[in-house]
Image (cartoon, helix red, strand yellow):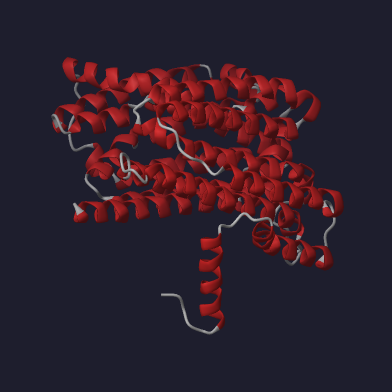
Amino acid sequence: MKKDIGRLGGESLIYGLSTVAARLLNFLLMPFYTHYLPPSGYGVVAAVFSYIAFLNIIYHYGLDQAYMRHRSEDAARAWSSALACLLATTALLTAPFLLFPSALAELAGIGPGGGRLMLYTAAILALDTLSLLPFTELRMRHKALRFALVRTASIALNVALNVWFLAGLGLGVEGVFLASALAAALPLLLLADLLFSARPSFDRGMVRSLLSFALPLLPAGLGSMAVQVIDRPIMLALSGAAAVGLYQASYRLGIFMMLIVSMFDAAWRPFFLERAGKPEAPAVFARVLTYFTALGAWTLVAVSLLIEDAVKADLGGFTLIHRDYWSGLAIVPVVLLAYLFNGVYVNFLAPVIIAKRTGEILKATLAGAAANVAANFLLIPPFGAMGAALATLLSYLLMAALVFRAGRAAGPVPYEWDRLARLALVTAVFLAGHYALGYGSSGPGPFALKSAAALLFPAALWLCGFFRPGEKAEAAALLSRFTRGKPAA
């Protein structure tokens, strides 16, 4: 058992690091796009990739999960049938893109002149789908390193091709999608030995089993993705491509909180499942929420205080984001807070999953998606990008509340509401002070003051009574060891 758990931990680390590396590489493209694409062009990119993210759920329709579930029964039949299903549905779904690209582009809100982008979209979706089963097979064979290397190589190629096509060849928006299509083809080349390891064939019984497992996963996947990306197409329809570009550039700065939530999520699920049923588990879960929220709140405060100076800093005639996009920076704290509540939602999943009440998760996800769509239509017209950011925040708040209620019914957890209230108060005071006194100011003086305020956040928690006496003693002992030059044991 110890060996198995150790292997799980090692594989989780590799997958987690590859995910972080992938998102960081993709993040590097955002400053690049702001310098080589106008807001309207970046808005088209953001909107179309939102469609791609949503359509990926439909193209995949949970078949990778179904294959993993049935692989142990008959690996050859499961593989051949799953591959045949994917080939058939990919051909069916891709045909409209090939036959009516201009009509689909107009329907998507990018105009009939965007027909070529629809062809690139079809290529990206089809290539991603064909690599789905090979990647799944690597996971089942515990080939985590190969999985990570192939995935990272594809994203690195995407970044390199973007730089070449936009900065070198001046291809503009079309270059972004050409780069993505070519990068999506790389995994197929590197995993060809897996893809062609068996011929596709329809086994009626296996296909029925695969689809009966996969299709119920589709609504939850669509709902979850809608919360993440539906705001871009709605904003495109209501406010135009330039507004989407401004929104996307600032929204991507939420990566600092997103990475914290993603890494926590990867570790949290095995953590709480291993402790399910133990008498001390509820208290441990409660303490985890407190510490996670404290880290998230500190990140929220620090990034909100410093992000404007970081974005506008002169790096030898170059800024992190082009000045044409600076008007959207006000949404960054709201985006960070939305991701933080997404992390709280992930925390609240523990008692629900342990009690096997996963239907409640589907309800929360669909409710969040519906609220997101409604809030975007209501808030974008009067508030623009801020309205879209608030819609995302409200969606995650609703999802967290619904899952908390379901978890309380499944098995109460003694969450430390008094400490969380103190944390919320201190966070609100720091953010209010920032907006009242320092928002919009930049330069060495204000930056030093903001940096000091960010560093003082834990001290403010200490003074307000957030930390327990035992935690204070441990912190004081740790500080004492380091000040004496003796590392903690």
Give the residue furthest to the front: 469
Quadrant for the C terminus in the image: bottom left
- The reply to whether residue 307 is visible in this rendering is yes
Give left or right: position of 448 versus 237. Answer: right
Question: Vertical placement of 230 versus 25: above or below?
Answer: above
Snapshot quadrant of residue 220: top left
Which residue corresponds to the image point at 58% horizontal and 16% vertical from the top-left?
103
As rendered, which of 298 and 192 lies closer to the eye? 298
Which residue corresponds to the image point at 70% horizontal and 45% vertical from the top-left?
333
Give left or right: position of 470 versus 454. Answer: left
Q: Position of residue 252 (x, y in %)?
A: 62, 44
Which residue corresponds to the image point at 46% horizontal and 34% vertical from the top-left?
124
Question: Vertical placement of 241 versus 343: above or below?
Answer: above
Q: Position of residue 463 (x, y in %)?
A: 68, 60
- The reply to whether residue 172 is visible in this rendering is no
Give left or right: position of 431 versus 28. Answer: right
As rendered, which of 371 and 182 lies closer to the eye? 371
Label tally = 0
Which residue corresponds to the image point at 59% horizontal and 38% vertical from the top-left?
174
Q: Position of residue 130 (x, y in %)?
A: 34, 33
Q: Position of residue 405 (x, y in %)?
A: 50, 27
